[in-house]
Image (spheres, rainbow, N blue to C red):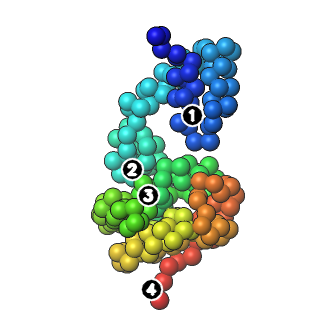
Amino acid sequence: MHQDLLNDLINALTILPGVGKKSAQRMALYLLDKNKDGASILAKTMQEAVEEISRCNRCRMLTSNDLCKICADTSRDEDNICVVESPSDVLAIESTGGFRGKYFVLLGRLSPIEGVSPEDLGINDFLNLIAKEQTNEVILATSSTVEGDATAMFIKDHINNIKVSRISYGIPIGGELEYVDGNTIARAIQGRTEINDD
């Protein structure tokens, strides 16, 4: 019995979010019939990415270097750190061009039900980072879900003598940052509000 590589490729493509069987079939046939060079580049790049990309030593963004390009960029504002849930949130904010500070990626949000604790999110690493870098402002850009709000408040409660803001303008309640358009995100960063102890 010979292995059916076409079927294997179609099944492999269905692991991508939003790609069903029909879309995977179209992609596989396009790559094999119309763009074999592109397929080879895709396969090679995917293999290299899987082997080489890990986490930035400072912010936990995905990178193939010790520091991601944002952390390594000396022209960025060192005083402001934006805390996000995922690498896709960094890309969403960066696409707006509206934020010139640095980031910290939590890789999730607090969820006792799912067993996600502050240790899993690297919150202690973050607190050590802002103390070491003498940060002036922390911008909490977690999603406006119950878990995202709880994560933001937990972080706020562990920060002293630093301004803590929360993005707000135009981000829908229960919304995930990666699905919000760039202009809305840029306005949310600019229209952030300071979180007070009340």
Decide which of tag 2 and tag 4 comes sooner along the chain: 2
Residue designated by label 3: 108
What amino acid does circle 2 point to? Arg
Q: Residue furthest bottom?
A: 198
Q: CA distance from mark 1 to mark 4?
A: 47 Å
Say which label, 3 or 2, has the lower sequence index.
2
Counting from the top left corner in percent of width and height, residue 139 is at 49, 67
Which one is in front in this view, the residue at disc 3 or the one at disc 2? 3
Residue that appears at 38% across and 78% down: 157
Q: CA distance from mark 4 to mark 3?
A: 25 Å
Amino acid type shown at disc 4:
Asp
Disc 3 secondary structure class? loop
The residue sitting at 63% across, 32% down in the picture is: 21
Marks 4, 3: nearer the viewer: 3
Amino acid type indicated by mark 1:
Thr
Which residue lies under the disc numbered 4? 197
Observer-nearest of 195 and 176: 176
